């Protein structure tokens, strides 16, 4: 049995579910298919982001931050606690509840917007006159035909050769989010976003965490000054970060994992740890999609090849999110999903990668948008820089968190804001002002002249803007 739709979206992660909702809002008869299963085998839409990514990691970051605050900072406020403890299974249960609320929220949104949802694996069968035929495993109907197809199949963790994930001792993001008890020792391979966020969670709860990173620079994509400040803060917290290492072997035994590596000085070293998280990037996922049946073009790394508007090599087949080029971020996937639906409807949306914000939800948080100082230097662009430390911000002092700074980079001639980089409290929220400013092509003077509430952390952004013109008032 087959059923026809105007738009069929494969994958209900942030790219896919947003594309489906937007397509339905625009009047298309839309279906969305997703194969993710919850513990009971039922549907769990939301993809990596909701199930084993953004949402559960932020739930655990919050729980562990609360524990860290209670253990190390409440006393500064005169709050005494004795016998502080962490119930890991309760913490994981709370995280699971948060995930389920998000799964259910997406199912509700599908209903509200009249998106037909199918639970199961979708694969291309053929392209015919009536559109694309898509097989739907385990469903009635067992095939759909679609005028337009949006591929939003996401990504999977990259495997380190010789260190397959068993999710018991060698963990991907999935296992890292459900370690049943705080390990005494935790190894992390890769000091990228996942390594730092998950390493922070388990360190705050008491694990002795060692991070092994192949590159000689820490957070190479981040503005150097900001990365340096973050490195200082993480090291002070007790995260052991070893850069410029070469992993030679990973051996797993019942007692734990042993990692043999060469350090920056060329010395052979061994790290013995109870659990090991491997977070060395992610790879596009087209498993089971049967892309070859219709001739959907993938590149040599497995990404679906798309143009700037997310068009694939096939007419009326689009692809968005982690499965295509560009940053692997949920909000980037969402923007592309909505934009594709609007393009199908004949509209002309635009997604600007230069104003996609990045956030690393460690403590301090790191957030940025636009160009780093090293990028501007490398292209020879003349710029002015202004920084303002949270140390000089009244609200940060009241919060008891004065780590870090706001840094603004502006064109030397036109004063247009080229990049904003923040390390410090609530950087994830503060960065939104910078994104708005850059989208509106604001100058640093525009921000400097805007009244910001006092006392607020956002005053640090205003002061960084004033500092671009060397006229900070509070530092
Ligand atoms: P996905 O979310 O991966 O969704 C793809 C969906 O497609 C999945 O549900 C999958 O089951 C389904 N699927 C695949 N193939 C088929 C098929 N053939 N048939 C049916 N269904 C199929 N990003 C942020 O912006 N902020 C964060 O804080 C953040 N934190 C993260 C933390 C971790 C630990 C990880 C791993 C990632 C994090 N990310 C974060 C990245 C973010 O999760 C991804 O960028 C985002 O999920 C990509 O969305 P997507 O829709 O492209 O793919
Ligand atoms: P990543 O690309 O952020 O970091 C991977 C790190 O591993 C890099 O520093 C790399 O140099 C290092 N590495 C690679 N091979 C190595 C090896 N053999 N030995 C040692 N180090 C090695 O990738 P990560 O952390 O796996 O996350 C994947 C993606 O998920 C991120 O890039 C991001 O797009 C997304 N994500 C976003 C989050 C957020 O927005 N807050 C949170 C978590 C993930």
Image: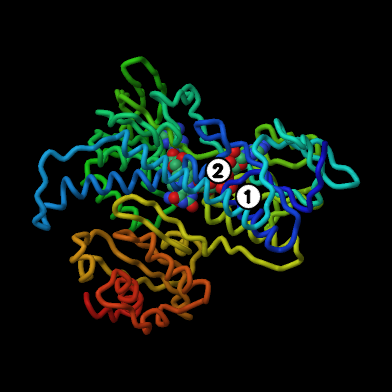
- Please give left or right for residue 293 compared with residue 162 in the image: right
Task: Kindly state the secondary structure of the residue where label 1 is placed.
Answer: helix
Residue 132 place in picture, x, y as percent: 82, 44
First in residue order: circle 2 vs circle 1 = 1
* Residue at screen point 42% across, 70% down: 433
Q: Can residue 286 be seen by looking at this rendering?
A: no
Task: Kindly state the secondary structure of the residue where label 2 is placed.
Answer: helix
- Please give left or right for residue 317 compared with residue 77 in the image: right
31 up-or-down from 269: above or below: below
Q: Quadrant of residue 167?
A: top left
Mark carried by residue 47: 2
User: Circle 1 is placed at which residue position?
Assistant: 16
Which is nearer the eye, 404 or 433?
A: 433
Q: In which quarter of the image is ligand 1?
A: top right
Give the spatial CA distance, label 2 vs label 1.
Answer: 9 Å
Mark carried by residue 215: none
| Distance from mark 2 CB to nearest ligand 1 atom below 8 Å | yes
């Amino acid at each position: 049995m087959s059923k026809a739709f105007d738009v069929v979206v494969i994958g209900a992660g942030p790219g896919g579910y947003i594309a489906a909702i937007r397509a339905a809002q625009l009047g298309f008869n839309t279906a969305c298919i997703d194969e993710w299963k919850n513990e009971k085998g039922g549907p769990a839409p939301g993809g990596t982001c909701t199930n084993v990514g953004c949402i559960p990691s932020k739930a655990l970051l919050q729980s562990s931050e609360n524990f860290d605050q209670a253990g190390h900072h409440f006393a500064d406020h005169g709050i005494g606690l004795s016998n502080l403890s962490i119930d890991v299974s309760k913490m994981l249960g709370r995280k699971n509840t948060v995930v389920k609320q998000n799964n259910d929220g997406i199912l509700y949104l599908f209903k509200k917007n009249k998106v037909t949802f199918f639970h199961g694996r979708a694969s291309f069968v053929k392209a015919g006159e009536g559109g694309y035929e898509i097989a739907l495993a385990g469903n009635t109907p067992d095939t759909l035909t679609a005028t337009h197809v949006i591929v939003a199949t996401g990504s999977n963790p990259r495997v380190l050769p010789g260190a397959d994930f068993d999710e018991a001792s060698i963990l991907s993001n999935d296992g890292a989010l459900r370690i049943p008890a705080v390990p005494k020792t935790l190894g992390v391979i890769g000091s990228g976003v996942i390594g730092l966020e998950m390493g922070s969670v388990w360190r705050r709860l008491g694990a002795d965490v060692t991070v092994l990173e192949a590159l000689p620079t820490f957070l190479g994509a981040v503005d150097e000054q900001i990365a340096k400040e973050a490195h200082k803060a993480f090291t002070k917290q007790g995260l052991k970060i070893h850069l410029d290492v070469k992993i030679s072997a990973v051996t797993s035994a019942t007692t734990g994992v042993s990692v043999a590596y060469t350090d920056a000085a060329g010395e052979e070293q061994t790290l013995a740890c109870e659990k090991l998280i491997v977070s060395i990037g992610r790879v596009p996922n087209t498993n089971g999609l049967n892309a070859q049946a219709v001739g959907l073009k993938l590149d040599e790394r497995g990404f679906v090849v798309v143009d700037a508007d997310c068009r694939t090599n096939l007419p009326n087949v689009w692809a968005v999110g982690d499965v295509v080029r560009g940053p692997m971020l949920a909000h980037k996937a969402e923007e592309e999903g909505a934009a594709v639906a609007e393009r199908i409807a004949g509209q002309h949306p635009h997604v600007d990668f230069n104003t996609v914000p990045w956030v690393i939800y460690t403590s301090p948080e790191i957030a940025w948008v636009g160009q780093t100082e090293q990028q501007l230097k490398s292209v020879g662009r003349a710029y002015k820089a202004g920084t303002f430390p949270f140390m000089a911000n009244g609200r940060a002092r009241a919060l008891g968190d004065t780590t870090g700074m706001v840094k603004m980079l502006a064109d030397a001639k036109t004063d247009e804001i080229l990049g904003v980089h923040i390390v410090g409290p609530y950087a994830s929220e503060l960065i939104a002002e910078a994104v708005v400013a850059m989208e509106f092509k604001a100058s640093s003077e525009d921000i400097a002249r805007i009244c910001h509430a006092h006392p607020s952390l956002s005053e640090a952004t205003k002061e960084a803007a004033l500092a671009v013109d060397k006229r900070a008032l509070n530092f």
